[in-house]
Structures are given as C-alpha cells and as structure tokens.
Amino acid sequence: MLAAVVRSFDRPPRYEEFPTPGPAGDRVLVDVLAAGLHPRVRSGADGTHYTSKGRLPMVPGVDAVGRLPDGRRVYFVADDGAPGTFAGQALLDPRRAVALPEGADPVVVAAAMNPAISSWVALRRRIDFRPGQSVLVLGATGNAGQMAVQIARHLGAGRIVAAGRDPGRLGLLTGLGATDVVSLAEEPGSPVSAAAADERLGAAAADVDVVIDYTWGAPAQRAIPAIVTRRTDRAKPLHWIQIGSTAGPEVALPSAVLRAADLRVIGSGQGSVTTAGIVAELPSLIEQLTAETLTADARPRPLAEVEKAWNEPVEPGSRTVFVP
C-alpha cells in the first residue's frame, strides 16, 4: 500500500510503498478516508512523544475515519503497536471504533476528534465537573484550546477564561464561548512585561474551579502562583488538569504553593484514562460535531503531498487533514 513513511526522526515522512498490514484476530483492514495531522502525530513522528519506542521505519497517524469492508464509515483510534493511519489502509480494532452517523463529514471528524477529545475526556472522566463551575483554558489559542473553550461552554461552564499568546486567535474566542480573554504576550527579556501578563491572568482566573493546561513549562510555572495567591478562598479545590506541554515538559513547583491552597494537579491522556474510557466518550462527541454544536476548520490535503505539507503553516484555528 502507499503510505506516509518516517525513516528518520529529523525528516518529514515521505509518500512511498509500505507493507500492507494483515488482519489478525478481530482486527479488520479498513480503507482510510481521512486522518488529521495533530501535534500528537508530529511528536510520534519525531520520536519525542512519551509513548515513543524509537522504532523505524514507521507510519504516523493515531486516528482516522475509515470505511469497513461492508461500506460502513467509522471513526477509530489506532492500536499503539499497529502501523499508523497515514496510509491507504489501516488495521482497526472494533473496540476502538464508533460508527459515524449519516451526514458526518469525514474530513471534519478527522480534524476535530483528537483536539476535542482531550478536554472532553478531561472534564468528563478526570474530575467531577458540574455545570456552573468556572474554567481557565491555558493555551486557548491552539486548536485543542479553541475546542476546549467550546466544550467547556457546551458542558455548562458558568465562566470561561481563555488565555494565550496569539492576538489574532484570542479575538475569536469570545465567539466560541469565552467570557474573558487574557493575553499572555510579552516582550522577550522584559520582566516587567512578564509580570504584567501574570497580573492579568491572576486577576481574571483567581477563583476558577478548573484549569485545562495545554502549555506546561514556563507559562504554567508562572500561572500557578499567580492564580493561587489571588484566590478568595484558598481551601476551595482547584483542579489543574495537565494535558499538553507545548511550552516545555517540566515546571518547578514551590512546595508552599501546595500547602497554601487546595491545588490538585492531575494529568489527562493515554494511561491516566483507559482506552475503553476514551472510546466510551466518542459517540457523544461525534454527535456534537455532526450537529455542529462544536466546530472545526479542516484543511484537506492529498496524502501524496505529505512531505511538502508536513511543515507548511496553516491559518489560525485550522488543521490539516490528509486524504489518501
């Protein structure tokens, strides 16, 4: 079969022949209709994701919309040990797949499911989120952050603070459900500007109930004390859900912050939520995408152009989807 093949972690995949995987057990070979280029796909293809085994060659891709041999269309999450979904065909585990309703656009589903499922699962599986609670989305100007704003609104958040660096994307977030937007932009090397950004964030998000964090690294390291020290009631639980690490893999967390407030730092991702738990959330999320309660801007590209398109910039809020 033809596929996007990674033969070196420091180069984009190339479109070339790759052995077609053979069905085994209850695994089914399906035709891939659309597969999204998510940050999770990129980190797998460059060997930096925490689940990476460092084995090459490999076919990237973690999920896709596929067509079963009987013609039915499904969204599925690829097995960790199977070739990825950036190919003409892929192996499907029925336990990791859900049927698509009539009218669902495969390209939109492929673009939206991965960024949407992160916050959907975090709010529905990792904590007891209740309508009326308030949410801070840290890193709200990324694709997953934009989806998190919409999902928090859909799940009944009473207040949604959206924080990020991209001024163009920040301007879009109130239309997606944010009640407050906070710019984290600062002048490089300017401690005054950094302190001002911390002040803005602390003032806006001091009393939120939940933080959905896609950044980690320096932004989270500064945001945690900026928020905790300004809380009206420090004994009120603050669930800090760590999902992404776009700004760095580590933070230095002062012990005093943990003693001075009821700060509960947890993660949400592969391992902290079972595969069965993630798959159980897929039908309701697909339903919202099909009903256009949640929206995504998908940019389809032929898979044959993967090497060229891999590092091409996309417009704010858009996601590249490869179509074999």
Image (tube, helix red, strand yellow):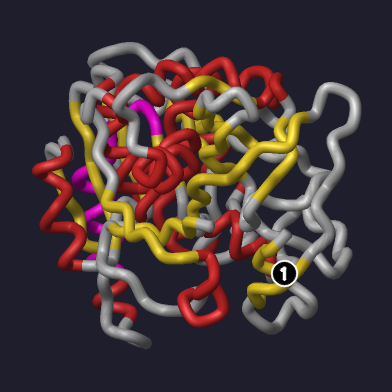
Tag count:
1
Whether residue 184 is visible here, answered yes or no, is no
Name which residue type carries label 1: Val
Is residue 229 found left or right of 245 in the rendered image?
left
Whether residue 51 is visible here, answered yes or no, is yes
Is residue 186 found left or right of 98 in the rendered image?
left
- Residue at image x 73%, y 59%? 1
> In this rendering, is residue 275 above or below 14?
above
**Where is residue 108 drawn, in percent x and y?**
35, 43
> In this rendering, is residue 59 above or below 76?
below
Which residue corresponds to mark 1? Answer: 5
Residue 272 found in image quarter: top right
**Where is residue 119 drawn, in percent x and y?**
44, 34
Residue range (magenta) = 195-210
Residue 44 found in image quarter: bottom right
Front residue of 289/171: it is: 289
> In this rendering, is residue 21 above or below 11?
above
**Where is residue 115 drawn, in percent x and y?**
44, 44
- Residue at image x 64%, y 73%? 15
| SS category of the residue bearing label 1 | strand
Front residue of 232/307: it is: 307
- Residue at image x 17%, y 48%? 173
Front residue of 41/182: it is: 41
Question: Which secondary structure class fits the magenta region best?
Answer: helix
Is residue 51 found left or right of 174 in the rendered image?
right
Check residue 247 for magenta coloring: no
Check residue 200 for magenta coloring: yes
**Where is residue 200 drawn, in percent x and y?**
20, 56
Residue 248 found in image quarter: bottom right
Is residue 107 found left or right of 172 in the rendered image?
right
